[in-house]
Image (cartoon, rainbow, N blue to C red):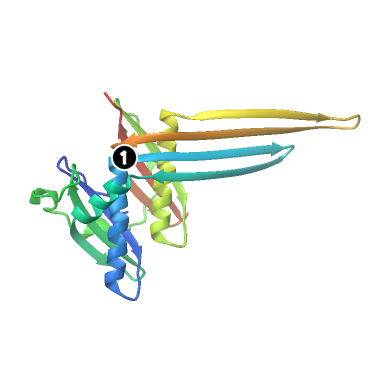
Amino acid sequence: MLNPPRTSECLYGIGISDRFREDDLSFSTARKNAAGYITRQVQVRVISGLAEVTFDSRVETRGYIVAEIDSLAYMRALYNAVQIDSFLSRGNAFVLTAIDRKLEAPSDEDCWDGLTLNLFQDTTESVPPWSKKIPSKEGFNYGVSVGPRYRSLKDSWDNSEKIALVNLAKQINVEVASLGVDYISDFYTQSQNWMEETTDTVIKGAHVLERRYDKKQDIYYTLIEYRLPQ
């Protein structure tokens, strides 16, 4: 499930990489992925767009998602984070890293005491209840995703997180535009409708609360929690 640990002192990064011929390259690539994971918890700019065109009974959709992070924060997370543990599977490399909340190297061993490789055990679960009913808690918003499988395990989880971030961002700020046109002749009438939904939102402090993989349906679920500003 690759669920991240949480403490009040540190931020954690779970990094995934394809397994290369050289293990060092596999782990270094995973550490870069973990640095991005940490940086998104500090601040991420979520940019997305979805366009839908309906013509009679036909529907076409196109969309994009960008999760933009600060490059300086990313470099600090990459070089200051301490690697707690690592693991090689047949096709992937995994790392678990920790850093303090100011993006400095952690000095307190409480950040990693008791954290073990069981964080990386990928277990098949039933559909999580929060995928059907989004959690409700005063002072918090939640983003949920139901993501497809990609060829790469890293891309599957990264895409699932992006979808959850977009669904969270839409609760904060979203713009919707629509247009409908009717084509009328002596013999028939055709209708065409166009809808565009966009968001461009900066989110600070959101974190992955839980992730699950449903092997039967081949779906990657992600739940993100965000504390609303006071």
For badge 1, the amino acid type reads Gln
Q: How many numbered circles does the render carry? A: 1
Viewed as shown, does residue 86 lie left or right of 182? left
Residue 156 rendering spot, x and y as whole percentages: 42, 55
Residue 77 rendering spot, x and y as whole percentages: 24, 51
Q: Is residue 209 among the parts visible in the rendering?
A: no
> Image quadrant for the N terminus?
bottom left
Give the residue pinned by disc 1: 43
- Residue at the extreme right: 186
Which quadrant holds residue 176?
top right
Viewed as shown, does residue 76 lie left or right of 190? left
Secondary element at tag 1: strand
Residue at 13% x, 54% y is: 114
Residue at 80% x, 31% y is: 183
In this picture, is 26 found above or below 161? below
In this orientation, which residue lies closer to the viewer: 129 or 152?
152
Q: Is residue 115 among the parts visible in the rendering?
A: yes
Which quadrant holds residue 78?
bottom left
Residue 45 rendering spot, x and y as whole percentages: 38, 39
